[in-house]
Image (spheres, coloured by chain):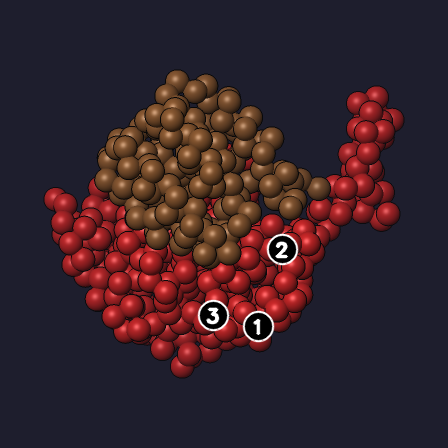
Amino acid sequence: MESKPFRVLIAKPGLDGHDRGAKVIVRALRDAGFEVIYTGIRQTPEMIAQTALQEDVDAVGLSLLSGAHMTLFPQITKLLKDRGLKDVLVFGGGIIPDEDVAKLKKKGIDQVFGPGTPLTTIVDYLNSRLPSVKKK
Amino acid sequence: MSKRSDPRLIERVLRGEHAAASRALSLVIDEAPEADALSKAFFPKSGSAQKIGVCGPPGAGKSSLTSRLVAHYRKQKLKIGILAVDPSSPISGGAFLGDRLRIQEHAMDPGVFIRSLANRGMIGGVSYTIFGAMHVLEAWGCDKIIVETVGTGQDEVEIGKVADTIVYVTTPSMGDEIQAMKAGVMEIGDIFVVNKSDLHGSDKALSDLRSAMSLGRTHEAKPWEPPVLGTSALTGKGVDELGKALDDHWTHLKKSEEGRRRLREQHKEELSLYISRRVYRSALDKISDRNLDDLVEHKIDPASLGTKILKK
């Protein structure tokens, strides 16, 4: 039997409107066999969590370039947990200083991808991480 | 699979929980082993909501118009479900589900449930599991379910066997009355909408469409003449009239034999999809590498082999 595709929400929290990076990720994941939902710019943490819930996604990818990641990313992981979405893999990308990455990982962000990350790295990461997360 | 099964899932969906509806939708859409039990539990609720199919070419404004329609219904405190279907890639199997972006303003409304679906290889504008998904939303308590199809061409009429009321959305720049005279999608619309009526040429598009529709008219008035309406999802103009036309059609279906006829059509389609999926999948599971080698070596032909496999 054919296996079902993983579903991924790509979301842009906060106020920055630079969504080319997010769109490149959407395209790469689509071409790698994922079902990708993209909800556009200026999403609140609540909208992102509610979308993840209604779409029953396996992973949420957050793209942020404005510097508000330390505020917004942890809010989103908390709201996901509040809604019972404990098995959703959350990863991030954008302009995120190295010193923040460790702190974000403590707040439930599984992985952070900086500028210049090859798209195959992100695809391989999801393909290897998702099956183990979903089995728990 | 264990974490997905919840013995109280059915009752939680019936109580209107978002998380439960979402999980039930996934089980149904993924054709999980639990899907049959869900379908059985939810079927008694079927037929309660008006299922509205929104179809039309890509970029006509189906999602934006859907969003306006949701706002219209929410003023009346109706509970709304939206199933937005977009195409799966025939190459990678992946999909970009982008309809939600236009409807996202309703994301936080507790009376609205939006789910994006990939068609996963089904042609015709919907997905194989669309009926199961609608049953979940009916059980969740929807008054209206809007199914937004894949932006389609001229002959994707599957939605006509899925929904109660078909809204065909087009735009001022989609061609003259000759286009509107063609067979296919133009035959299944219950309501025709020229969206983007804020653009130049909408009056001509409306009159072209109306005159094309009138060609099929006889002296006897039909119980339902599809209205042709102008809307603008950008400004909201014409959305109340569309809402009124949808209500009128729903009343028409309930009052006439047509409602029952359509339900029968829908159930027939659901049943045939169920059977064909089951037969198809179990038959494909039986194909072995040996079979394929036999075909390559001309030891057997596809017809004889197919017959043998179906008999197994």
Where does the image place residue A19, in percent across and percent down from the top left?
30, 32
Q: Viewed as shown, does residue B2 lie left or right of B308?
A: left
Q: Which mark is residue B11?
A: 1
Q: Viewed as shown, does residue A4 lie left or right of B194?
A: right
Crowding at mark 3 (Cα within 10 Å: few <14, some 14-19, many 20+): some
Where A110 falls versus B146 (above or below)?
Answer: above
Q: Nearer the viewer, residue B186 or B6?
A: B6
* Co-location on one chain, circles 3 and 2: yes
Q: Nearer the viewer, residue B278 or A48?
A: A48
- In primary-sequence order, the first of circles 3 and 2 is 2
Name which residue lies at 61% across and 69% down: B8
- Say whether residue B72 is visible: yes
Q: Viewed as shown, does residue A63 lie left or right of A54?
A: left
Q: Circles 3 and 2: CB distance less than 8 Å?
A: no
Q: Amino acid at mark 3?
A: Gly
The chain letter of the brown chain reads: A
Name which residue lies at 33% across and 36% down: A69
Q: CA distance from mark 3 to mark 1?
A: 9 Å
Q: Amino acid at mark 1?
A: Glu
Colour in which the image shows chain B: red
Where does the image place residue B105, in percent across and percent down from the top left?
28, 54
Read off the residue under disc 2.
B4
